[in-house]
Image (cartoon, grey):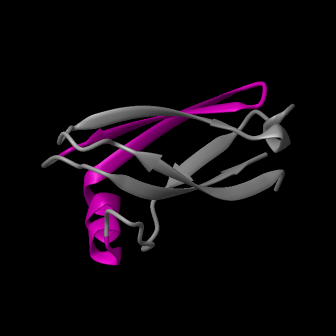
Amino acid sequence: MGTQSTTTVDFGAVPVDEGSFVIVDANLAGLTYAEVWIMMDSTADNTVLDHEIANALMRTACSISGTNLTVHCFVEAGLVTGQFKLRYAAN
């Protein structure tokens, strides 16, 4: 596997049903395959349970361009606010 890491994304204070984020990671250079997922972590804004629910109700799509990993998050039911931790791997 090329690289794997964790990042925190912030959906802001206003409830939303989607968000897009760009992760900059020098280890992504030359890689073409990536995936992003939510594990049972916690942040200042969201508990482990919030992350577990988000994992069940949020879909992610991503693409790599150079050292940038663009992540699109789509909530299938409900709305989200605040910070969530994302895990990602690429090769």
Q: Residue 13: where, in percent of width, then height? A: 24, 44
Q: Residue furthest toward the left?
A: 78
Q: Residue 6: where, in percent of width, then height? A: 62, 59
Give the extent of the magenta segment: 47-76
For residue 31, what is the image quadrant?
top right
Q: Is residue 74 above or below residue 3?
A: above
Query: Which residue is at a point 25% across and 55% down the rendered structure image?
Result: 57
Query: Which residue is at a point 73% across and 57% down the rendered structure image?
Result: 4
Q: Is residue 24 above or below residue 84?
A: above
Query: Which residue is at a point 14% across and 48% down the rendered structure image?
Result: 77
Q: Residue 1: where, in percent of width, then height? A: 82, 56
Q: Is residue 30 above or below residue 41?
A: above
Q: Residue furthest toward the top?
A: 65
Q: Is residue 71 magenta?
A: yes
Query: Which residue is at a point 34% across and 66% down the rendered structure image?
Result: 51
Q: Quadrant of the C terminus?
A: top right
Q: Residue 80: where, in percent of width, then height? A: 23, 49
Which residue occupies the foreground of this view, 91 or 79? 79
Q: Is residue 59 magenta?
A: yes
